[in-house]
Amino acid sequence: MNSAPKHPLFCLKWPWDHHQNQNDTHNLKNSPCTLDTPWLFKPFKNLGAVAFNFINSAVTTKSHNSPFQFNQKRKILSPEEQGEAEQRAFAAALASGKEATVLEFYSPKCRLCNSLLSFVMEVENRNSDWLNIVMADAENDKWLPELLHYDIKYVPCFVLMDKYGRALAKTGVPNSRLHVIAGISHLLKMKRPQSD
C-alpha cells in the first residue's frame, strides 16, 4: 500500500545519545528524531539568545566560568560627570510633563541625607504616575545657580516644583529625620492629584 516508513508519534531520543549516533550517518538519515528545536519555538529560542547575548555584552562578567555572576562594581563618576548626570535627570524630569518634580539637595557626607535615601526612593515609586524626584549634590559646583536661586542653606532640602518648573515650596531646617519626613509629606499633599 504505502511504502513510506511510519514515523513514531513522539521521539525518545536522549541528548547524551546524540553525539554517539552522530558518527553513524546511516542511523541519522533514517532516524525520524532530531534534536532541532520545533519550528514553532525557534523564534523564542532566537529571541532568548539575542536577549542573553545583549545582557552578556552589556554587563562585564566577574568570572568567565559562569555568565550569570555579574560584576557588582560601578564606575565612579568624577564630580563634573556626577553633576552633569544629575542635571540631565533634572531636565528629563521636568520634560516628562508629570504634575510635580521634587529636587532634593543633599550632601554625600550627610548621614541624615543617606538615611533618607530608601524612603525617598519608596515615595517616588509609590507616586511615580505624577511625581519625579531628582537628587542634587549641594557640594557640586554645577548646582550653584540652583542653590542660590532656591536659597538652599541646609541639607537635606526638598524643593517642590510644578510641571512648568516653578518652585512652589521647600522643606524647612532639618531638625530630625521625622521632621524631614513630615516636610516631604506636606510638600506632596500640595500637589497630589485629587482622586475623583
Image: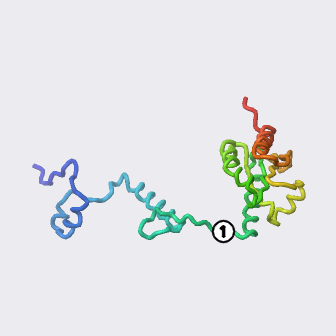
Q: Residue furthest top?
A: 196
Q: Position of residue 161 (x, y in %)?
A: 82, 48
Q: Residues within 10 Å of mark 1 (few under 14, many from 20)?
A: few
Where's residue 122, x and y in %? 66, 46
Asked whether 41 or 71 is in front, the reply is 71
Indicate the secondary structure of the residue bearing disc 1: loop
- Chosen colour scheme: rainbow
Q: Is residue 46 above or below residue 174?
A: below
Residue that lies at the very extreme toward the left in this rendered image:
1
Against 72, residue 7 (above or below) is: above
Q: Where, by quadrant of the figure, is residue 79 drawn? A: bottom right
So how many labels did they put on this image?
1
For the question of whether residue 77 can be seen, the reply is yes
Residue on which the image places disc 1:
76
Q: Residue at x 19, y 70 (%)?
A: 23
- Residue 91 visible within the image: no
Give the image quarter of residue 27.
Answer: bottom left
* Residue 13 placement (x, y as % from top left): 22, 56
User: What amino acid is labelled 1 in the image?
Assistant: Ile
At a point 83% along the width and 50% down the height, the residue shown is 165
Tell me: 187 left or right of 25.
Answer: right
Q: In percent of the image, x 75 and y 56: which residue is there?
A: 135
Tell whether 124 sits left or right of 39.
right
Position of the C terminus by quadrant:
top right
